[in-house]
Structures are given as C-alpha cells and as structure tokens.
Image (cartoon, grey):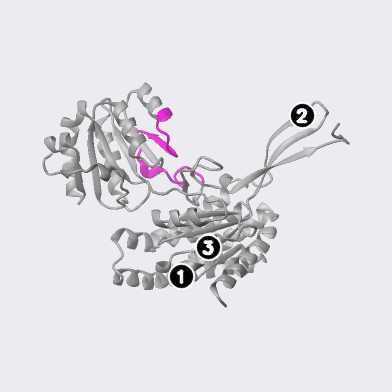
Amino acid sequence: MEIKQLVLSKAKEAKEASRLIGKASTDTKNKILLRMVEYLKQGKDELIKANKVDVEKAKEKGLSKALVDRLTLTDKRIDEMIKGLEEVIALADPVGEITKMWLRPNGMLVGKMRVPIGVIAVIYESRPNVTVDVTGLCLKAGNSVLLRGGSEAINSNAALVKILKQALKDEGMHEGVVSFIDIPQREAVLEMIKLEGLIDLVIPRGGESLIRTVTENSRIPVLKHYKGVCHVFVDRDADLEMAEEICFNAKVQRPGTCNAMETMLVDEAVAEIFLPKMLKRFEKAGVQLKGCPKTKKIYPNAMDVAEEDFYKEYLDLILNVKVVKDIDEAIDHITKYGSAHSDAIVTRDYNKAMRFLREVDSSAVFVNASTRLNDGYQFGLGAEIGISTDKIHARGPMGLEELTCTKFIVFGSGQLRQ
C-alpha cells in the first residue's frame, strides 16, 4: 500500500474509534488506563530491549548527546510513564462538565459543556515516553490519538503501541483509539497534515525545523512551541544561595529539554558577589560559559557571547550570561530574545516579583523556582501532551482540560425566534 493510502486508512480508523471513546464512561476509560499500567509494568524488559536497538543505531548515526538522552528508556523513565498514567486515572474527567449556565429573558437556559476534540495527531521526535503520555491524556479526555514518532525511536514506539493496543483490545475498546504510523519517510507527515475532516488537531513535538514544517504545511489547526529560550533573572534583592541552586538546576539538571535555562541574567548590583562562585560551579559541571563584557570582566574564563547567541536554544551544557542594570533591562532582554516559554525571577521583593509575573509574556512565569518545573506532571495536570506558547485555545502545559473544547448547550421550553 502506498504511503498516502496507508496514512489515510490509519486516520479513518482513528476517526471511527474517536466516536466510541468520546462517549465512553469515566469508569471505562480508567479501566483501560489501569490495564495499560499493568502491561507496562509487565513489559519493562521487552521495552528496554527494543529501545536499546534504537539507542545503538542513534549512536552509530552520530546523533547528539541530547537526542540520545531523550531517546533512552530506563527503568526510572518507564516508572515515570506509569506514574503519569496513574495520575491521569486519579484526575477528574473533564468530558461532560458544564462550565457555565445562564438564564435568558425568554426563559431559555444557555450553557457550555466540555467535549472531546476528536482525533489528535501527535508528531514527535526521539522521546518514546511521549507515546504513553499523550495516549493517556488523549484517552481520558475522550480523544483518539494518531501517533507518528521519529524514525530514530521506531522500535521503542512500536513496542509501546503494541502494549497500549493490547490493553484496549482486552477492555473491549476499538484499537484505533491508539493508531501508529510506522513509516519513517517525511511524506507520511505531509500526508497526515492534509487530512482535514479526519484529524481535528495536530501537535508537533520536536525540533524547531519539524514544528515549522508542520505549521507551514498543515491544513489542520496546530498547537506548538518553536523553541524554549528560557531565562532566569537574579535580582539584587534575591536570596543568593537560593538563586545559585535555582540557576544550577535550571541549566544542569537536564539541559536537553525545552524548559532548561539558556540565558542567566544577573543584576549588576550583585554580579560581583554572585557570579564568581556560580560560574565556577557551572564550569565544574562541564557548562560552557558565554558572557557579556561585564561578565568577562568579573569572570575572564567565559567566552565572548554574540548577540545571535541570545536567540539560541542550545539544548546542551552551554549558557549565556549577561549582567543587566536592573529589572527593566532584564524584562526588555527577555521580551526581545525570549521564546515565550519559561522565564523566572529570583527575588525577595514582592513588588518586583508581581511586576515580573505581569510583564513577562511567557507560557509560564516563575518566582523563586526553576524553569525546569514548567511541566504538566509538576503542575499536577498528570503527564502533559506538550507545552504550547500559542495564545488561542491552550497555553503552557496541556493537560486534560486543554484536550477538550466546549460546545453550547441550550435548555428551552418551546422558545422561538421572533
């Protein structure tokens, strides 16, 4: 079967399944998710075995350390997937919730009800955990999901989908609720995003080039973020010990993620106190430092930072460091160079904290906390389907509510339009 027909058949299968999962009870959906948890626990060895094939091939191809890290499945990461599903099970089902209701002068009751979106296509790279995370959320919100992972994770994803489909089958649900396109060719993606009427929403998760390709070619609404150029601003009124821990975590804990810090901004009033110890700690951890002239004067080991560096998402142990005059310059810098993803201020000044929250226009803004916390699981949403920097429909980590839309419902008693 040619690629176009294969993709079309998978999308039709997902559409058919969406009608069944869309009307399934909360109890039915939770039973399916519990079965998925059970099978993931049983299948750990099989999953890690399949994943090792992908990891070895990725290393042979010379993929970056960040990509190999994203690709790798460990016992801990499988346990995190399982815990994510368990959290989704515990969350309230948004489907059918009536969010508003009001009475019109003619006696008609008008309201809004949450309903599933339908078929959600998720196009992603490297991370096999996405397969489970998005399936759990989409299913609980009454949607079917059409998955297209990257070729580098094809064995891992196939093994995961096999487990998820078995759980659906054993609970008597249409297996098309989880559909997987195992075609490595780019043409498969381009065919998917043409299927207006079958697919209701596209969510690309991966590098900027993938997301731009999908956005520029899709006939279907797309939710996305292009990149995560995230900042931490250390204010003159910061607890500097706290600032050091936050900045270190934001950069080093897992640098290959979209919510890792790429630029550290430091108020000039505390720069000479804060930077020497902080930058020495970064260097010891293997971070390559790029500093502005003021930074280099304080810490000569830093390389020169070019203006174009401030726009970069490194996804690696590389950090821009800039000394700023005050909070005004920090906010101006974030506004110019940031990607509206995750930004933080460290300060004990309440008024500055509130001003930063109001004026920094990002999907998540933090006071005295690491940008690495911009995550559905960390926010209590269960596993997330992605982080959106769009402003229409959803923004920030997308949990269950963001995977539904609303429709108007009307209760009448014979009203007619005059």
The percent position of residue 237, horizontal first and vertical second, equals 27, 25
Q: Which amino acid does label 1 sit on?
A: Gln
Q: Residues within 10 Å of mark 2 (few under 14, many from 20)?
A: few
Q: How crowded is mark 1: few (under 14 residues within 10 Å), some or many (20 or more)?
A: few
Q: Residue furthest right?
A: 414
Task: Please say whether residue 406 is one of the residues in the magenta stretch.
Answer: no
**Residue 195 seen from this side:** yes
Pointer 1 or 2: first along the chain? 2
Q: Mark 1 points at which residue?
A: 185
Q: In this view, does 398 lie above or below 171?
A: above
Discs 1/3, front: 1
Tag 1–tag 3 contact (CB < 8 Å) = no
Q: Name the residue under label 2.
A: 103
Pointer 1 or 3: first along the chain? 3
Which of the labelled discs sits on residue 126, or is there none? none
Q: Which residue lies furthest to the front in this view?
A: 216
Which quadrant: the C terminus?
top right
Q: Which amino acid does label 2 sit on?
A: Leu
Q: Residues within 10 Å of mark 3 (few under 14, many from 20)?
A: many
Q: Give the range drawn in magenta.
A: 357-381
Disc 3 to disc 2, C-alpha distance:
42 Å
Tag 1–tag 2 contact (CB < 8 Å) = no
Which quadrant: the N terminus?
bottom right
The percent position of residue 231, horizontal first and vertical second, equals 32, 39
Which of the labelled discs sits on residue 147, or is there none? 3
